[in-house]
Structures are given as structure tokens and as C-alpha cells.
Image: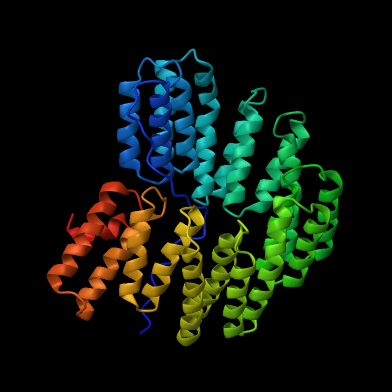
Amino acid sequence: MFKKKLLIVALLVLMTGVCFADVSSDSQQGFEAQKRLVMDYIHAGRTNQAKAELAKLQQDYAANPEMTESLYWIARRYVKAGKFEQANELFSQIAEQDGDSVYASKIALNLPTASIMKRISLKNLSEAETETADLIASFAGHDGLPEALYDIARRYKEKGHYLKAKELQQYILDNHGGSSYENWCRLDVHKMTICTAIEAGDFSTVNEQVNLLISQYGSNKKLPQVLNFMAVRHEWVGEYTRAKNLHQRVIGTFGGSKGAAKSQLDIDKCDVLALIDSGEHDAAIIAVDSLITRYSDNSYLSEALSKGIAILCHRKAVSLEGQEDIDGAEVYYQLAADVWEKAVELGGGDAITAQACLMVGECHRLLGDIEKSNQYCQKFVDDWPMDKLRWHGLSILALNYQQLGKDGGLSKAEADSGTQAAYQELLEQYPDSKAAQSASKWLGL
């Protein structure tokens, strides 16, 4: 029985699963391990734990000469994670306690930069533009300005505002040539031009820019990766023949590289995507199994399955559900779940496997198979304790227990106990998550 769709969160972002660091030593190694633990908790969205471990770092290693530098980079990690209040607290602390340090001198620039990045995250783009202009005017001679502008451009890019990112990177090229960010910006400007051209269906511009990239950056070790990315962008808009042609150029130009190995796999992946688009689902599953057999030793196999094939199926399911084609949506949710399960079966504790495991649980909840959803969500929660979407796994578990109670799969007491445990852990570890309000409401807090 098809269940009402949950609010689909941004599950298609770069995820990570990391192990807890060993912080037992009071040596420099212990200091580094404790700092790494703080960073990991920030990345995982576990703000309470990050705060507690940061306090431990400052208490246990107060005399460490690298403390100010470490606090600066922890603050930067908070900015990257979108935790701007916590970042500003640390920036202010550094300014007050070590005002003569080189890092304190950077804070005057970092505070407005963090504010601009927050504006972008909140989609307040006009305010972001105004504040960026003020930043440029106020810090025209500051050595750190190119880096700040590059960080702002990267946030624009992460949020899909490619033209804004391109404009800011072009400004860096025009006004800060010779900085360490010049080469990155030149490459990114080409990438953003290609991305916007692909979205607009302007493939003549795409071809021109790709030729320029190869001619100007042929010796750049990152170029195969960039071209791989461009080919995948073609896949996103259903241009599989163009994607395969670009993958073939990577193989022909950079044979023997990791990028060439990825492109060889992706060429065959495009054939699977075309089968899915044409509705030949049985043939697509056979092709997926063949892909797994032929590329069992290719390190990009999990990525092709999880972030390529399964994602396409999931997008189609969401689209069909939006059109109220429930039967059609069920077919693609099931297909997505099948492919993600195959990715999980490949093993490995990496971020892609974590994503696959969570998405199997998500899909089976939407399909009404609550027990299987619980199985995969529990595995995700247990096996990836530091994943930044672990809160979502806990949220699905809580919803599943409630559904099992309604369906009679569990007694009310058992269902309430499971829901309570999942929601309590969610609130304790992820008080700022999107599901925290629902958890508080159910718990009566």
C-alpha cells in the first residue's frame, strides 16, 4: 500500500561517515585528535556534542600554542556547516583573548563574510550582493579578500546560483590576478559557463568551452574530474549521447587516469539511464547487474549506482507523485530501492554506501514496507554514527514505529517506546535539525 510521501529533504548532498577519534592522550597527538573530534561533530550536525568537546579541548589543552589557530579553523568549519552564531562566538572569543594574533586580524574580514554566506543560505540574495559590495569596499587592500570572495562564490555555487558564482570569480580574476585563487577561479568560470549553457540547451557554447578547457588546462591533474562532472551534468538533462561523447574524450585524452576509468564506467551507465527513461525497467535491472559484474573492481561503481542510476529513478518517482500518478511513482520508488540495495550490498563504510542505506529506508517507507524501512534505517543509524543526515534516519524510525502501532504490527506500548527512544536521541544529538520540532511536539516538550 503506497504511503503518503514524507517531506523529501536534500538527501542527495555529499555525505560522510567517520569514526570517533582517540582523544586519550594529553600529548600533541591528543590535542589534534580532540580538535578533529570537534570538527567531525560540527560536520555531523551534532551541535551539543561539538560544544561539549570544544569546551574539553579548551580546558584540557589551554596552554597549547596552537589553540588560537585551531579555534580559528573550528570557527571556519562552523561557517561551512551553516552554524553562523557558533562561528561568530568563536571569532569574537579569539578577538578578545588573543587580539594581537595573526588570526585575530583575519576576523574583521571573516565576520562579514560569514554574514554574507548566511544570506545566501537563506536565499536573501539582494542583501548578500549589497553586503558583498560593502565587503569589497571596506577590505580593498586586505590580503585575505580573494579568499573571502572565493568562499562566497563557492557558497553561491553550492546553492545552485551559478551566474552569481561566476560573476564573483570573474571579479577575482579581474582585480586579484596573481593570488593563489586565480587558477581555481579560471577553471571554475569555465565550469559555471558550461553548467549554465547545459541548462539552457546551448550545446555549441558547451563544446566551445570544453575545447578551451582541454587546450588551456590539459596538464591540470583536476581536468579529467572536471570533464567527468560536465558529462554527468549532461546526464542530468537526459543528453546521454552527448554525455557519452564527452566521457569518450576523457578516455581518449587522459587514458590511464582515474578520470578515464570513471568515464569508461559512466559510458555504460548512460545506457542504463536511457533504458530507464524509455520505460524498459526489466532490461535496466539486467543491465545494472551486468554493470556490477563487469566493473566490480572499479572504485566508482557505488557512485554510479547510487548517485547516478538510483537518483534518476527517485527523481522520476517524486515527479510522478507530484502529478498524482501514484502507480507510476511506486514503480520508480521500487526501482530506486532495488538499485540502492545493490549499492549497499557492495559493502564499504563510505559516504555513498551510507546514502544508499538511508535511501533504501526512505523508499520502502514510501512504498509502505515499514519493517524493511526500519531494517535499513536502523543499520544507517548504527553503522554511520557521525553522518550528517543521521537525524533523518532517526526521524524515519520514529515515524515507522508510529505507523507500526497504527497498523497493528506492534502493540501501542512497543510503538510508543520505539518512537520515544528515536525522538529522544534525535533531540539530544540534533536539536537544530529539521525534525526537532516534530520530535518535541510528540514528546510533549
Q: Is residue 287 above or below residue 198?
A: below
Image quadrant assignment for residue 276: bottom right
Image quadrant assignment for residue 33: top left
Which residue is pictured at 51% across the width and 36% down the height?
114
Front residue of 344 and 245: 344
Residue that sits furthest to the left in the current view? 413
Front residue of 339 and 1: 339
Q: Is residue 387 left or right of residue 121?
A: left
Residue that sits furthest to the top in the current view? 100
Return the x and y of residue 308 as percentages of the image width and height. Answer: 60, 66
Which residue is pictured at 46% across the width and 43% down the height?
81
Front residue of 378 and 84: 378
In which quadrant is the C terminus drawn? bottom left
Return the x and y of residue 275 as percentages of the image width and height. Answer: 65, 80
Q: Is residue 68 above or below residue 213?
A: above
Front residue of 191 and 289: 289
Return the x and y of residue 340 as percentages of the image width and height. Answer: 49, 68
Which residue is pictured at 57% across the width and 66% down the height?
305
Counting labels gives 0
Q: Is residue 274 above or below residue 119?
A: below
In which quadrant is the N terminus drawn? bottom left
Return the x and y of residue 302 as percentages of the image width and height. Answer: 56, 61
